[in-house]
């Protein structure tokens, strides 16, 4: 079940609020002694997150389907998407699974039950586990919640109607999300190389219908290790033709985010297969990203489904 994006959180006693955590959405499935972790596009994440799989075995249930988010936590408790992507470079971060819903439990299909009843089952199912944790319900007014999460550097807020059923695959108005910073996923369609095998900037975009639209260059957020890793992933995808339908630009734009015809030959184009999570300050008047920074690659989404979020 997915959430609709909103600009203002709904208020009222029929709503509960949870932090929007910066990680991988996943289903944790237990069937006796068998554990699987599935991403939104049904990729098997079980071997990638063994600690979460081990925590799943400790659930107080014979069989269960738990909905939640895989998150890498720093020592101060803040989630980091980059640390989740590059765990070997962030050994101090702990990978946990925040559970916020249960849709099947010990032979019972719970999707038609109200959210509050489903969530009420989770504390007993999870118990006092350090890896599988209950996503907190946030107290206070929406203004208090937004201010507290912004101060803590949390990505956003999810509001859920307490009486809502679970609607799989639906972007329902019963679940809505407010992002407190500008970030979304973009398709990588090329890069500007630097040196013999280096990477100066990613070229990213989004789909509008069947056409890939260029959104901007991303030069921030890279360490030397990440640059090498990205170069290794992108080189096998290099193609001769530009995949962006709206390039070249007639000018480089006010903020220098465009790519004119004279600069096209400087770029390496790639098959639009890899997806990057990007943080940015705003969209420019030319529909380009301003002050964009790379956060990590996403493997839980399909490139064709990446759209410009309003």
Image (spheres, helix red, strand yellow):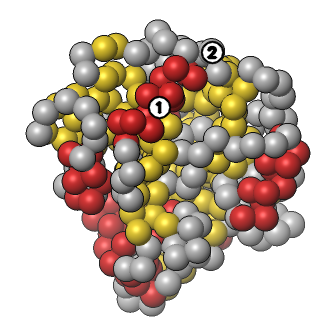
Circle 2 SS class: loop
| Residue depicted at x 37% and y 79% | 91
Vertical side of 121 occupied by 50: above or below: below
Q: Quadrant of residue 263?
A: bottom right
Q: Is residue 260 above or below residue 309?
A: below
Q: Which mark is residue 193?
A: none
* Residue farthest along the left direction in this orientation: 33
Q: Is residue 18 visible?
A: yes
Residue ID for mark 2: 163
Most foreground residue, 237 or 30: 30
Q: Are marks 2 and 1 in contact (CB under 8 Å)?
A: no
Residue 34 in picture, x, y percent from top left: 13, 39
* Residue 22, placed above or below residue 121: below
In front: 306, or 16?
16
Please state which of residues 268 and 67 is positioned toward the viewer in this rendering: 67
Label disc, if present, on residue 101 of the rendered structure:
1
Taking 111 as reference, is 232 left or right? Answer: left
Quarter of the image where one finds residue 160: top right
Question: Of callouts 2 and 1, which one flags the residue occurring earlier in the amino acid sequence?
Answer: 1
Would residue 300 be found to the left or right of residue 63 on screen? right
Q: Is residue 11 left or right of residue 114?
A: right
The residue sitting at 52% across, 73% down in the picture is 74
């Amino acid at each position: 079940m997915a959430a609709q994006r909103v600009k203002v959180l709904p208020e009222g006693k029929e709503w509960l609020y949870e932090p929007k955590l910066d990680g991988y959405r996943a289903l944790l499935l237990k069937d006796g002694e068998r554990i699987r972790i599935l991403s939104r596009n049904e990729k098997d994440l079980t071997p990638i997150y063994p600690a979460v799989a081990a925590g799943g075995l400790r659930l107080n249930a014979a069989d269960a389907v738990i909905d939640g988010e895989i998150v890498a936590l720093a020592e101060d408790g803040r989630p980091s998407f980059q640390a989740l992507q590059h765990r070997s470079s962030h050994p101090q971060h702990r990978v946990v699974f925040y559970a916020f819903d249960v849709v099947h439990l010990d032979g019972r299909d719970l999707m038609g039950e109200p959210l509050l009843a489903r969530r009420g089952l989770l504390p007993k199912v999870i118990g006092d586990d350090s890896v599988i944790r209950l996503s907190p319900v946030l107290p206070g007014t929406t203004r208090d919640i937004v201010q507290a999460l912004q101060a803590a550097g949390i990505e956003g807020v999810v509001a859920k109607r307490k009486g809502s059923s679970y609607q799989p695959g639906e972007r329902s108005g019963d679940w809505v999300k407010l992002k407190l910073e500008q970030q979304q996923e973009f398709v990588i369609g090329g890069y500007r190389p630097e040196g013999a095998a280096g990477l100066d900037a990613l070229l990213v975009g989004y789909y509008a219908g069947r056409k890939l639209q260029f959104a901007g260059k991303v030069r921030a957020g890279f360490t030397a290790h990440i640059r090498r890793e990205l170069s290794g992933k992108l080189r096998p995808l290099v193609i001769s033709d530009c995949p962006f339908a709206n390039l070249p630009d007639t000018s480089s734009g006010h903020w220098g985010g465009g790519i004119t015809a004279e600069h096209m030959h400087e770029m390496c184009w790639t098959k639009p297969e890899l997806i990057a999570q990007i943080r940015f300050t705003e969209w420019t008047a030319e529909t380009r990203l301003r002050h964009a920074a790379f956060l990590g690659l996403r493997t839980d989404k399909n490139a064709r489904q990446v759209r410009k979020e309003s």
